[in-house]
């Protein structure tokens, strides 16, 4: 930070005075330079808005955070499936879900059959058979409750396994990352992976997967039962499914991108908070003006995060309105069709079909909404996977490079040693030849930039 005073530049009459170090001071409404935050060199910026290419003329140490675009890669889903247990776990979950929904459909069919007997049996026969119908229905209902608990526990246990595996892999990758990774990635960016992204993996994905799988099986079994009873409804349901998929696919793309933007804009906010906590004493030392500057920077970052969150909510409400209108229209069509066909169907089947119509259409809406939520939530494992793929530093012990009992003495030899910090950077040490014998005490002296720290980093392999 620069200090203001003693070096004013004369200006015309009422023109604002610009001092030598004004570009380092907080912008105000009367500042003679632009007050937009994003243009100032000291300002943390939204990495998603600007893209820079790394080259020799770009001296920035901290690069912009990358953000994926387009559909979430199928590799992300495949990797997550491996983390929960692979195909054996998938087959097990499908079996549990099928048994759960089969029991639910069975209880509905049994209830429909029971209600239909009232029209063909006498009162005494109906009462005498009631105990049998109630016993079977209670057994089916109780079995359905047990399978519901079993289904929920199975899905959340599988999600916990995936969460633990991804957390351990990301942690190990960060512990083995080279020092240059931590120099080029601020702490807030790393904290965002552990807080926001891991929270998504821990909570949102298992919850979304549980709800979506339940809805898919409910719709599949309900539609199958309905079409077996009233085959002509296929003419209505097939165009309906196409319409739902069309609206859903149109909605998923912006919803997915807004989720990525939302996660990316959260990193600068966390990074600034972390820096202010560590440098609170220094900030207060320069007075309230600097405190207010960092407050404005924080408000700017919060506004950027809230903008993306607001846009995401607007997109979701747009989708919900259209899907609900389609569902209401289709319920009207099915109701009219059942009224027209009342002479061909008994009361039990009409009630069953109407019940499934009222159940399936909202479930179709939920499937599209939850699928979009699940796909946007998969951005979390996608971002965690980026950190699990961090290039590791060199191994602590290079196999076959040294003897088992090395070192036996403290003799160190630099022979034509050269060193650079990054692959395309110029050499900071070139052809250094030093021989340090065992027991000698050596002092390395030189001006700033002579290479003292670089020599130490090369010796301890910190930059590998």
Image (spheres, rainbow, N blue to C red):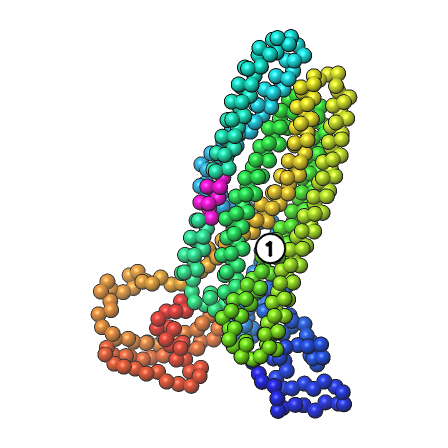
161 drawn magenta: yes
Closer to us: 182 or 329 = 329
Q: Is residue 236 left or right of residue 104?
A: right
Foreground of the two, 386 or 20: 20
Residue 395 seen: yes
Q: Which residue is mark 1?
A: 260
* Residue for point 35% across, 82% down: 444
Q: In this picture, which residue range is highlighted in magenta?
A: 155-163
Is residue 160 depicted above or below 191 in this figure? above
Q: Is residue 433 magenta?
A: no
Determine which quarter of the picture holds residue 399: bottom left
Residue at x 53% of width, y 70% of height: 276
**49, above or below 431, in the image:** above
* Type of secondary structure dominating the magenta stretch: helix
x then y, percent, for residue 127: 60, 12
Element class at badge 1: helix
Q: Residue at x 48, y 38 (%)?
A: 153
Q: Position of residue 383 (x, y in %)?
A: 53, 55
Hey, which quadrant is residue 247 in on the image?
Answer: top right
Quarter of the figure with residue 445: bottom left
Relative height, residue 178 to residue 228 (above, below): below
Relative image position of residue 160 (x, y in whole percent): 46, 45
291 or 246: nearer the viewer: 291
* In this picture, residue 57 sits left or right of residue 13: left
Q: Which part of the image, by quadrant, shows the C terminus?
A: bottom left
The answer to which of 145 and 193 lies nearer the viewer is 145
Task: Give the x, y percent position of residue 193.
Answer: 51, 57
């Amino acid at each position: 930070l620069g200090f203001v005073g003693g070096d004013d530049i004369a200006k015309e009459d009422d023109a604002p005075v610009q001092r030598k170090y004004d570009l380092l001071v907080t912008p105000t409404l009367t500042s003679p330079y632009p007050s937009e935050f994003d243009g100032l060199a000291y300002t943390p910026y939204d990495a998603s808005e600007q893209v820079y290419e790394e080259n020799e003329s770009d001296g920035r140490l901290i690069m912009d955070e990358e953000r994926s675009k387009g559909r979430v890669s199928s590799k992300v889903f495949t990797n997550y499936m491996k983390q929960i247990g692979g195909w054996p776990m998938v087959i097990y979950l499908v079996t549990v879900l099928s048994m759960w929904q089969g029991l639910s459909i069975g209880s509905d069919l049994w209830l429909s059959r029971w209600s239909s007997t009232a029209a063909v049996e006498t009162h005494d026969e109906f009462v005498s058979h009631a105990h049998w119908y109630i016993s079977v229905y209670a057994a089916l209902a109780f079995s359905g409750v047990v399978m519901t608990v079993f289904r929920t526990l199975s899905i959340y246990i599988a999600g916990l396994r995936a969460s633990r595996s991804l957390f351990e892999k990301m942690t190990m990758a960060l512990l083995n990352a080279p020092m240059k990774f931590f120099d080029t990635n601020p702490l807030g960016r790393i904290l965002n992976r552990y807080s926001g992204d891991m929270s998504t993996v821990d909570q949102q994905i298992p919850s979304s997967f549980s709800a979506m799988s339940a809805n898919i099986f409910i719709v599949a079994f309900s539609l199958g039962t309905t079409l077996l009873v009233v085959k002509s409804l296929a003419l209505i349901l097939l165009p309906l499914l196409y319409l739902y998929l069309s609206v859903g696919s149109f909605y998923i793309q912006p919803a997915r991108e807004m989720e990525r933007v939302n996660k990316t804009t959260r990193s600068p906010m966390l990074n600034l908070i972390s820096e202010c906590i560590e440098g609170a004493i220094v900030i207060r030392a320069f007075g309230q003006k600097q405190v207010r500057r960092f407050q404005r920077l924080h408000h700017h970052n919060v506004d950027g995060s809230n903008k993306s969150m607001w846009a995401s909510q607007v997109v979701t409400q747009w989708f919900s309105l259209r899907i609900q209108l389609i569902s209401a229209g289709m319920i009207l069509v099915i109701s009219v069709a059942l009224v027209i066909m009342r002479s061909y169907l008994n009361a039990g089947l009409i009630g069953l079909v109407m019940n499934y119509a009222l159940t399936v259409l909202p479930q179709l809406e939920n499937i599209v909404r939850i699928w979009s939520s699940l796909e946007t939530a998969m951005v979390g494992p996608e971002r965690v996977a980026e950190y699990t793929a961090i290039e590791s530093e060199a191994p602590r012990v290079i196999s076959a490079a040294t003897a088992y009992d090395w070192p036996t003495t403290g003799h160190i030899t630099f022979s034509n040693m050269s060193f650079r910090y990054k692959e395309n950077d110029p050499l900071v040490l070139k052809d250094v030849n030093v021989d340090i014998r065992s027991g000698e005490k050596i002092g390395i002296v030189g001006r700033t930039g002579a290479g003292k720290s670089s020599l130490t980093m090369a010796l301890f392999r910190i930059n590998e």
